[in-house]
Amino acid sequence: MGGVERIAEAFATSGKRAALMPYVMAGFPTLAASVRAGEACVAAGGDVIELGVPYSDPLADGPVIHAAGTQALAAGASMAGVLEVARALADSVPLVAMCYANMVFAPGAERFLERLAQTGVCGLIVPDLPLEEAGELLALCDQRSLALVPLAAPTTPPQRLDAIGAAARGFLYTVSVLGTTGERNSGQDRFTGLVAKAKAATDVPVAVGFGISTPEHARQAADAGADGVIVGTRLVRAVGEDPASVGEVVGELAAALAAPR
Amino acid sequence: MSDGDATALVEHRFGPYGGQYVPETLMPALAELEQAWLQARSDPQFARELGALLADFAGRPTPLYRAQRLSERVGWPVYLKREDLNHTGSHKLNNALGQILLARRMGKTRIIAETGAGQHGVATATVCALLGMECMIYMGTADVERQRPNVQRMELLGATVAPVQVGANTLKEATSEAIRDWVSSVEHTHYVIGSVVGPAPYPALVRDLQRVIGDEARAQMLEREGRLPARVVACVGGGSNAIGTFTAFIDDTDVELVGVEAGGEGIDTPRHGAPLTVGGRPGILHGSRSAVLQDEEGQIKQAHSISAGLDYPGAGPEHAFLRDTGRARYEAVTDAQALTGFRELTRLEGIIPALETAHALAWVLTQQNGELDLVCLSGRGDKDLAAVLGEA
């Protein structure tokens, strides 16, 4: 089964109101500890894991994920190390790598994608590669059944959203707030309009991310019709503060998505 | 300003360089900015408004000065384009005036900027005071230390200076923080990028606003010498004063264009800021593809320069293109050479240059031959006294 199909199956068979998609920073705080964090996410109900690739200049990330990446790099998390983490998790859960554009293109996009595909990674999110710059990479990903997952933002106008939705593979990553990744208090109605618009623009599942940190947020996103809920900063913080709590945090999120209403 | 051509597009790419490598959230804002600039640059009212401020507020045109004793020292005539006499002490005001007028036209109420040496921050804070706009300047903590007078100036002008403590605490990190702010605040905020870097349309926009330097200098040189310079020399961090000076001469193919980068402790060491000079694989930094200091996996490396304004691991995409096509060449000058240039100009001409500018002067001072040089004296060096005297 190709990466695109594995992701589709994960959405279809999550058994929840929306698939739960935890973010794990590879190599944070160490390679081995990030594998354990990923395993804990899967055991507690994670359906797809977004695997962060540490980068020197992560423009789309807030302070918590930025600091985690910096710490991972300082601990020696090279691309080879990131791929080891991916290999250790790839059989048990579909992985989508979140990686900044310069790291994709530095070794050559084909070589980079080959390494991902050989490791069993199913998809790729490049947060600083908007539609206008993504054409060549999308073709290369399609050839390998790797899902190139685009982002849509609250600022994205309707026509542009249609174009992004048409180019989406795996799922459409809908950014729920203006800003970088990070936890936010206000949740409420912000998801409803965004999710509806995103779903109208694409055939693939719509996942909501950025600023989702509590079971209540996750429930609101599912209420709004999201097919997937991405939780990043909250989990990275858990890994940093108390790795043993990761399973519990993910379990609460999973329960919030499973609960009938 | 060049003659406004409403039909010409704003360049997104310069050969294989440039582009828009930014989070999706910013893409509509970049499109809005590009449209606003297309309209403004062909609007006579905008040209009048900017022209009046450049004349009466900034003090343009700046003089072209024949540096007599410097010329005697090197053995050929050297002219200095006196951007240090522009209000706020550097060329940065040209861009800040244009962009903030544009931002006001777009209905933005808040201005953010990054700064390294503080010159762009001071220029931005100055125009925000002039136009009554809210202003936030991001600056690495290392630069806050080494450019303290400029921090004080910005605060006096009413700006908030946000110290950035990440990585090497310099210009690269300040730029990243400014972009992150913009992702969160894009609906009411304009990001005044200070150099010919960043995602399109910024490299073209900043060049259009800085080309006044070369347009003036070319006319002044023709008037003074009855000919064009043989060489045009400018320092390059991101490269805005260099592009601003070069652009008027691009089609004068007999005029040699020389960009001088920060050689730091030497380009054979890891401690420099000379991505154009050392070459290597291009990379993506702060939204555009260009010459970048990076490792094999694509992690961006830290730059080093004694000069905060040149302490940057990237350079503008148009510079990378000018290098590849052979139209301009790029060389590096070390920290030590720049300090010599700083002292030489001060003693020979009674002009204290910025440490950034001192790189261009040092390059001229180390040449064996010359005919007629034009050097962009991009800024004054009052801000650098502590750093220079500390090095003595």
Image (cartoon, rainbow, N blue to C red):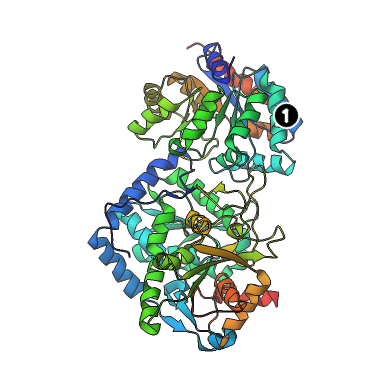
In the image, residue B290 sits, relative to residue A147, either above or below, namely below
Foreground residue among B328 and A34:
B328
Q: Is residue B211 left or right of residue B165?
A: left
**Which chain is home to disc 1?**
A
Frontmost residue, A213 versus A18: A18
Q: Position of residue B315 (x, y in %)?
A: 54, 57
User: Which residue is at the front of the view, B190 or B207?
Assistant: B207
Element assignment for label 1 = helix
Q: Measuring 36% from the left and 66% from the top, which residue is drawn there?
A: B130
Question: The N terminus of chain A appears in which quarter of the rendering?
Answer: top right
Tell me the residue that label 1 is attached to: A84
Q: What is the x, y in percent for residue A92?
A: 67, 17
* Residue located 42% across and 19% down the image: A203
Side of A243 where A16 appears, left or right: left
Q: Is residue A201 above or below residue B80?
A: above
Q: Is residue B106 visible?
A: no
Q: Is residue A70 visible?
A: yes
